[in-house]
């Protein structure tokens, strides 16, 4: 028996009927992914064209294909609006696939980069890098490095890994229910938020503005060089996650079953958490804290197409991108004043988190 036997193709004796049912099973999932892909494209093009200087849908497509006959529109698309769209797609996809993998390897529907405290740990690490770069290494090349995007990303990643290590260690000590992992994450959130508040108290005006940025996720400050780094990390990590999709399916059924199917659960869990943390840290170091996308996208995807990670992972990426695109659009244009996208996603995600938690508690209390 292998891991792929978890989702076998129906065989004889009811060959035709079973094959038709299985094809419909796959067809629904593929159609859902195709729908999300089209939706992301359409919303992106509409969003690019929307604004004080309106550009039609067809003109946006022409500009994206290289038409620069209208220099003003060309500059508006490529220099002002497209970076925001690409940021929303990459960050939304990165947070969503991180959440999907964390939920599988931890077998916890409430797991996500935000609920486990990883996002706030990354923001704390970014703030830590900003503070020490000026306070300790002022006027040196070290200051230039740590105050730049790469130094801040390293600080964010290091503290994210510390948070992951704490979550995994404490949840092993007191792992009575799946919710215990999230309870540890909530405690870490409080600790890192306290650390961020302390940094704000001691920071000067320049440092304070940089630190506050991490607490209000905003996709409008990214640059192409930073997006190139995020894309490279996101692409490599996503390829690995898709390669391990069968192992994640196995782990959804429990460690004992997964190990009987040949999955090394300890290394799969650890590597999955590390890589999910890596892309979360890079995303947070660019845009700041954006809450609940990593919880919403995988949960909604599994509700619609089931738990098969062959389809959940790519669908979560697209749905996470779509959620962040729509949330950013609402934040910028729905209230007459620009609201950071992190506030919008938290307003949406908070009630959903409560609903998932209540459902999980009821399921755990129901006699099997």
Image (cartoon, grey):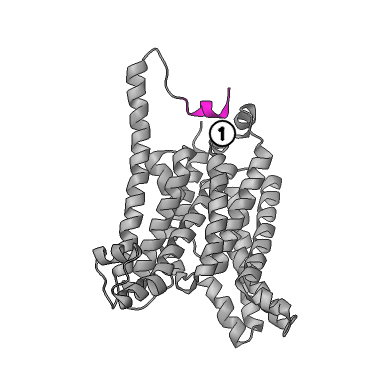
Describe residue 101's horizontal placement relative to residue 307 as left or right. Answer: right
Residue 349 lies, in percent from the top left, at 44, 59
Residue sitting at x 32%, y 71%: 68
Residue 102 percent location from the top left of the image = 56, 48
What residue is rendered at 58% in x and 76% in y? Answer: 211
Magenta span has 242?
A: no
Q: Residue 312 sits in which quadrant?
A: top left
Q: Please state the horizontal and vertical placement of residue 161, each as a whole percent of the image.
A: 67, 57
Q: Does residue 289 appear in this view?
A: no
Report whether residue 156 is seen. yes
Label count reads: 1
In this picture, which residue range is highlighted in magenta?
1-8
Q: Which is nearer the eye, 252 or 52?
A: 52
Q: Is residue 292 left or right of residue 304?
A: right
Instruction: Out of 203 and 245, give the one closest to the viewer.
Output: 245
On screen, residue 96 above or below 304: below
Q: In which quarter of the image is the N terminus?
A: top right
Q: Is residue 41 shown above or below 298?
A: below
Mark 1 surroundings: few (<14), some (14-19) or many (≥20) residues within 10 A: many
Taking the spot 66% from the left edge, 35% from the top edge, the residue there is 264
Q: Which of 86 and 217 is in front in this view?
A: 86
In the picture, measured across the screen, residue 270 lies left or right of residue 15, that is: right
Secondary structure of the residue carrying numbered label 1: helix
- Single out the residue that lies furthest toward the bottom: 205
Q: Residue at x 65, y 37 (%)?
A: 265
Residue that label 1 marks: 250
Q: Going by the picture, which residue comes out furthest to the top? A: 13
């Amino acid at each position: 028996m292998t891991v792929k036997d978890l989702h076998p193709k129906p065989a004889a004796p009811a060959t035709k009927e079973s094959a038709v049912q299985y094809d419909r099973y796959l067809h629904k999932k593929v159609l859902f992914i195709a729908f999300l892909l089209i939706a992301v494209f359409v919303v992106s093009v509409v969003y690019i064209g929307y604004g004080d200087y309106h550009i039609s849908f067809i003109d946006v497509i022409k500009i994206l294909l290289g038409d620069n006959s209208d220099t003003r529109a060309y500059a508006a698309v490529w220099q002002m609006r497209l970076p925001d769209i690409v940021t929303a797609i990459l960050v939304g996809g990165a947070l969503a696939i991180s959440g999907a993998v964390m939920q599988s390897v931890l077998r916890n529907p409430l797991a996500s980069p935000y609920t486990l405290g990883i996002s706030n740990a990354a923001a704390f690490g970014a703030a830590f890098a900003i503070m020490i770069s000026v306070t300790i290494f002022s006027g040196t090349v070290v200051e230039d490095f740590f105050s730049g995007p790469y130094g801040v990303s390293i600080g964010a990643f290091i503290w994210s890994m510390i948070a992951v290590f704490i979550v995994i260690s404490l949840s092993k000590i007191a792992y009575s229910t799946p919710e215990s992992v999230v309870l540890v994450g909530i405690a870490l959130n409080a600790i890192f938020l306290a650390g961020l508040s302390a940094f704000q108290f001691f920071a000067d005006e320049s440092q304070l503005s940089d630190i506050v940025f991490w607490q209000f996720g905003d996709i409008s400050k990214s640059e192409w060089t930073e997006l190139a780094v995020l894309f490279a990390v996101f692409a490599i990590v996503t390829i690995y996650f898709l390669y391990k999709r069968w192992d994640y399916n196995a782990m959804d059924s429990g460690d004992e079953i997964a190990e009987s199917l040949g999955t090394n659960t300890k290394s799969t869990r650890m590597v999955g958490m590390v890589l999910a943390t890596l892309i979360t840290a890079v995303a947070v170091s660019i845009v700041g804290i954006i809450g609940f996308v990593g919880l919403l996208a995988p949960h909604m995807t599994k509700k619609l197409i089931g738990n098969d990670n062959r389809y959940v992972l790519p669908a979560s990426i697209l749905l996470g991108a779509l959620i962040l695109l729509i949330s950013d659009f609402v934040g910028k244009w729905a209230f007459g004043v620009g609201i950071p996208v992190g506030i919008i996603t938290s307003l949406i995600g908070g009630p959903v988190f409560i609903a998932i938690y209540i459902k999980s508690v009821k399921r755990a209390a129901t006699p099997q």
